[in-house]
Image (cartoon, rainbow, N blue to C red):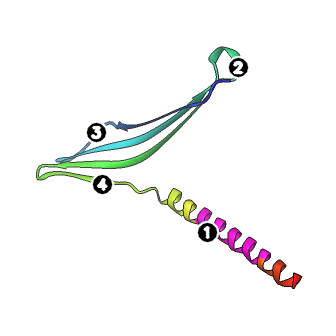
Amino acid sequence: MQIPVQKIRVVAGTPIVVGERRLLPSVLVTTVEGGKAGEGGFFRFVKARPVSLVVQEPEGARWLEIPNVTANTLSQMAAAGAAIALVSVLLMGLFHLMRKR
């Protein structure tokens, strides 16, 4: 069995012209490939997420980041769940020790 290979790259999108402005989006593309093509165990997973937008105007260019709010929120929820589980285990151990006395 072959170890899956992960590739991460930033790809510039097709420029969009709006009046005098030119918008250039960029996308973070994550590709995971594994297995061998001839053996039937081959798989490929591709995920694309917008990460930024460059606004080019006659006065200059601005770079705007697109935050990943969902991933940040899920990470915070996972950390809170792990903290609650740790505190619960510590309290159960403490109560168990107090009961023995």
Queried whether the magenta region covers residue 71, the answer comes back as: no
Disc 3 or disc 2, which is closer to the eye? 2
Q: Earlier in the sequence, mark 4 or mark 3?
A: 3
- Which image quarter holds the C terminus? bottom right
- Residue hosting label 4: 64
Identify the residue position indicated by label 1 in the image.
80
Magenta-drawn segment: 77-93
Q: Is most of the magenta stretch helix, strand or loop?
A: helix
Q: Which residue is mark 3?
A: 15
Cα distance between the residues tagged 4 and 1 = 30 Å
Residue 40 % position (x, y): 70, 19
Depth check, front residue: 19 or 81: 81
Mark in front: 4 vs 2: 2
For badge 2, the amino acid type reads: Gly
Q: Which mark is residue 40?
A: 2
Mark 1–mark 2 CB contact (< 8 Å): no
Question: Of tags 4 and 1, which is closer to the observer?
Answer: 1
